[in-house]
C-alpha cells in the first residue's frame, strides 16, 4: 500500500517569498490534515479536510496561509508571503474516515521549510 | 482548551532495559482518546499505541504498554526490552471526540544506547 506522499522534502526561501507544498494522501482516504511542526514542539493542526470540504481551519493564519483540496484527493498548502517564524516541518496526514479518535492517521515524511 | 504536557524533553536507556515516558493532559471532556506516536529521523509519525478513555484496561502492543490513570489525567508509555530502533521522538496526543484532529505534546527525545 502506497503511503502519504509529500513534496518537496526540503525548501529554502527568503522572507516575503511564496512557497507551496503538495500532498497526495492514501487512495480512498476521505480526511486530510496539514500540521505545522516547529522545532522543539509537537505538530499543530493547521487545517482538516473531509473530501474537498474544510472541517477545521481555526488555527490557519488566513492572512498568509491558504490550502485547497481539489476533487477531494491531492492537497496544496501555500504561504504568501513567508515570515521567519514559518520555518517548520509541514506534515500531511490522511485517514480513511472522519475523526482522529477512531481512525488511524497515516503521516507523510513532511516538508522542511527554512525561511531566511 | 485541551493541553498535553510531556515533562521529559530527553531520556536515555540502555538496550534491553525498560523505560517509561510521562504524559499528563487537561480536559473537561468525559470521553476522549489518547495516543503515543513515534517520530524517527525520517520525520514520519508512526502510531505506537492508542487508549480509549472509557476503557479501564491499559492498552498493550507487544513491547509497548501504557499506564492510564484517568483521575490523575496521566498517560505514561512503558517500553520494555528497548531496542536501538526505538530511538526517536515520542509524542503523546489527545483527541476529545470523533471529527477532531489530534492535539500533541512537545515530545520526548528517547535515545537507546548499546
Image (tube, coloured by chain):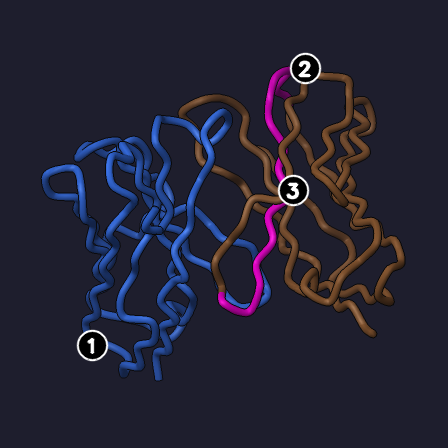
Subunit that carries the residue with mark 3? B
Q: Which residue: 57% across, 46% down?
A: B104
Residue B91, x across and y down, in percent: 63, 50
Q: Is residue B70 left or right of residue A31?
A: right
Q: Are marks 2 and 3 in contact (CB under 8 Å)?
A: no
Q: Is residue A33 left or right of residue B29?
A: left
Q: Which residues are magenta?
A: B28-42
The residue tagged with tag 3: helix, strand or loop? strand
Extreme-left residue of the structure: A71
Locate residue A85: give its quadrant.
Answer: bottom left
User: What mark, if any, has residue A17 been given in the picture?
Assistant: 1
> Gap in Å between the C-alphas at discs 1 and 2?
48 Å
Residue ID for mark 3:
B4
Residue A11, above or below B76 = below
Are tags 3 and 1 found on a single chain?
A: no
Is residue A38 one of those drawn in magenta?
Answer: no
Is residue B32 one of those drawn in magenta?
Answer: yes
Amino acid at each position: 500500500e502506497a503511503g502519504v506522499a509529500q513534496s518537496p522534502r526540503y525548501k529554502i526561501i527568503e522572507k516575503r517569498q511564496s512557497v507551496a507544498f503538495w500532498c497526495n494522501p492514501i487512495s480512498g482516504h476521505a480526511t486530510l490534515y496539514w500540521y505545522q511542526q516547529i522545532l522543539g514542539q509537537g505538530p499543530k493542526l493547521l487545517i482538516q479536510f473531509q473530501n474537498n470540504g474544510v472541517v477545521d481551519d481555526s488555527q490557519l493564519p488566513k492572512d498568509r496561509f491558504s490550502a485547497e483540496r481539489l476533487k477531494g484527493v491531492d492537497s496544496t498548502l501555500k504561504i504568501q508571503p513567508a515570515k521567519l517564524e514559518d520555518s517548520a516541518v509541514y506534515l500531511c496526514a490522511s485517514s480513511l474516515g472522519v475523526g482522529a479518535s477512531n481512525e488511524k492517521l497515516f503521516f507523510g515524511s513532511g516538508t522542511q521549510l527554512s525561511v531566511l | 482548551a485541551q493541553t498535553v504536557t510531556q515533562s521529559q524533553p530527553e531520556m536515555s536507556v540502555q538496550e534491553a532495559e525498560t523505560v517509561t515516558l510521562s504524559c499528563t493532559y487537561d480536559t473537561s471532556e468525559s470521553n476522549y482518546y489518547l495516543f503515543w506516536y513515534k517520530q524517527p529521523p525520517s520525520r514520519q509519525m508512526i502510531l505506537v499505541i492508542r487508549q480509549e478513555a472509557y476503557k479501564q484496561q491499559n492498552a498493550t502492543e507487544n513491547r509497548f504498554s501504557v499506564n492510564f490513570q484517568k483521575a490523575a489525567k496521566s498517560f505514561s508509555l512503558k517500553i520494555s526490552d528497548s531496542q536501538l530502533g526505538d530511538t526517536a521522538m515520542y509524542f503523546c496526543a489527545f483527541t476529545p471526540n470523533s471529527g477532531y484532529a489530534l492535539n500533541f505534546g512537545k515530545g520526548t527525545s528517547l535515545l537507546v544506547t548499546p
